Image (spheres, grey):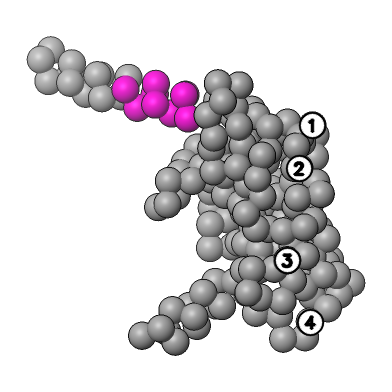
Amino acid sequence: MKIYLPIFSILLNLAVCNASATVPLQGKVVSVADGDTITVLDQNHKQHKIRLQGIDAPEKAQAFGDKSKQALHALVHGKTVEVVFTKKDKYGRIVGKVLLGNQDICHQQIKTGLAWHYKKYQEEQSMEDRDAYSASESAAKRQNLGLWSDAQATPPWDFRKNKQQNRE
């Protein structure tokens, strides 16, 4: 009996932590840093940095970096959104799916050709989102939308890697 009690306690703690992590965050978008990062002010006036899940937008110094940021700003700035999340990244940002009503803002950035589907982290997405994001990226690419109009479009993860190597 003594052996099972700690195991039960650990499992109960995990269940409680997981349940609380899936409660959506709601708040007003007060800042847009770039094409995949926003700041949300909740009802308690606490700010939360949000990294949009499943996408990677061009960096500010890249082609389409400003356009991606401007498009995201036009979609959500000053509006109340819901963020569905289960984790934070190494910088302490919430990584989540951002919803404006029924509109998936992360997916919208891909549809308009202003972000890549971030396949490195696709296992963190639902199968439905993973398939939809991938299909939308392919469609945007076929239609030469946004960043796909640039024959030399460099994914942000490669851009960051090259920038890091140049510093060394």
| Mark 1 or 3: the one toward you | 3
Q: Are marks 1 and 3 in contact (CB under 8 Å)?
A: no
Q: Which mark is residue 150?
A: 4
Among numbered discs 4 and 3, the one appearing first in the sequence: 3
Residue 101: x and y in percent read 79, 32
Distance CA(mark 1)–CA(mark 3): 25 Å
Mark number displayed over residue 101: 1
Q: Which mark is residue 25?
A: none
- Counting labels gives 4
Quarter of the figure with the N terminus: top left
* Mark with earlier residue (3, 2): 3
Of 72 and 22, which appears nearest the observer?
72
What is the quadrant of the C terminus in the image? bottom left
Q: Is the stretch drawn in magenta largely helix, strand or loop? A: helix
Residue visible at 56% across and 78% down?
159
Q: Which residue is mark 2?
A: 76
Under circle 2, the secondary element is helix
Q: Is residue 59 magenta?
A: no
Q: Nearer the viewer, mark 2 or mark 1?
A: 2
| Real-space CA distance between mark 4 and mark 3, rounded to the nearest whole angstrom | 15 Å
- Count neighbours of disc 4 (C-alpha within 10 A) and say few if under 14, some if 14 to 19, many if 20 or more: few
Q: Which residues are magenta?
A: 13-21
Q: Badge 3 is on which residue? A: 66
Please state which amino acid type lies under the numbered disc 4. Answer: Asp
Q: Earlier in the sequence, mark 1 or mark 3?
A: 3
Q: Secondary structure at mark 3?
A: helix
Mark 1 secondary-structure assignment: loop
Near-viewer residue (55 or 39):
39
Residue type at mark 3 is: Asp
Amino acid identity at mark 2: Val
Specify which label sits upstream in the sequence, 4 or 2.
2
